[in-house]
Image (cartoon, helix red, strand yellow):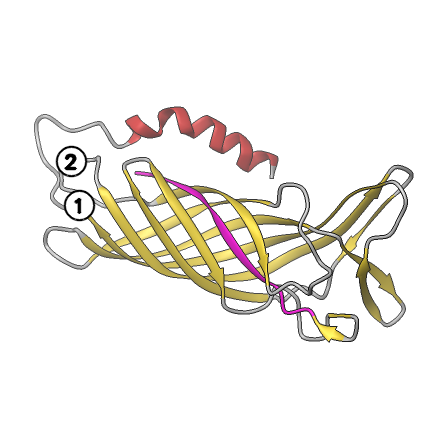
Amino acid sequence: MKFLIRCILFFIPVLPSAQSVTDSVSVDNRYLEDQFYIGLTYNFLLNKPNAIGQQSLSYGLRGGFIKDIPLNNDRTVALGLGLGYGAYSYYSNIQATEVADGINYSIVSTDGFRRNKLETHMLEIPIEFRWRKSTATEYKFWRIYTGFTLGYAVGARSKLVTDTFKDSFNNTDVTKFQYGVTLNVGWNTFNLHAYYALNTLLQDNAQFNSQSIDMKPLRVGFIFYIL
């Protein structure tokens, strides 16, 4: 996660110039766009039980590569198929506790409570339908990219921190295969990003007060495209 933060801080100053260099001798009419991406999101939890509330800054960091596949001669319409990685934290007052037969969920009631989170690490496959106003010599343009992101949870941890102790363990209740719809809209370097999950963050056997926890992530933030 620290590596992704360093990447964002490193690339942001150079992003405006990353697509501003043109070849004064020749024009490449077979150019490709937006093949690398870095994203920063705020993560909402939808469909929460009434007693559950979010706390602190639930952030997400993502990055990866997308193969750009133009669909017309002007290269303003394309498909994108990629591979990436995302780390997403969800801070809330629902505490996960390991018990003999699995994981129990309850409202945090520990004295000296400081923070409580669920963190997921995802391998992601973004699939995008891309419309843009780019040309072989114009690198500042509008874009609208819609599509899906398929994700596989390669790791997940629940962590509780109080004034006197820390409790952290691998959370096996997280849904392994996650998927949702995406929308990326913007001009030039800075673009708005939204992801709406179509399935739940936790598996059906995860329960709170004898009811399934049907929380779904909504992630909203920025995405930066390079090359």
Q: Position of residue 188 (x, y in %)?
A: 27, 36
Q: State which mark lies toward you, 2 or 1.
A: 1
Q: Which residue is mark 1?
A: 133
In the figure, residue 15 lies in which quadrant?
top left
Q: In the rendered image, which quarter contains the C terminus?
A: top left
Mark positioned earlier in the residue sequence (2 or 1): 1
The answer to whether residue 187 is left or right of residue 159 is: left
**Foreground pick, 204 / 149:** 204
The answer to whether residue 33 is left or right of residue 64 is: left
**Mark 2 → mark 1, Cα distance in angstroms:** 9 Å
Three-letter residue code for mark 1: Lys
Residue visible at 44% across and 59% down? 125
Q: Does 216 appear in magenta?
A: yes
Q: Position of residue 207 (x, y in %)?
A: 75, 71
Which residues are drawn in magenta? 213-227
Dot 2 crowding, Cα within 10 Å, few <14, some 14–19, many 20+: few
**Foreground pick, 27 / 174:** 174
Three-letter residue code for mark 2: Glu
Q: Is residue 126 above or below residue 162?
A: below
Q: Position of residue 220 (x, y in %)?
A: 47, 49
Q: Is residue 166 above or below residue 102?
A: above
Q: Main secondary structure of the magenta part?
A: strand
Residue visible at 41% across and 48% down? 193
Q: Which label belongs to residue 138? A: 2
Query: Helix, strand or loop at disc 2?
Result: loop
Q: Does 23 appear in magenta?
A: no
In the figure, residue 223 lies in which quadrant?
top left
Kindly check if marks 2 and 1 are in contact, taking CB atoms under 8 A apart as contact. Answer: yes
Residue visible at 50% across and 68% down? 198
Query: Helix, strand or loop at disc 1?
Result: loop
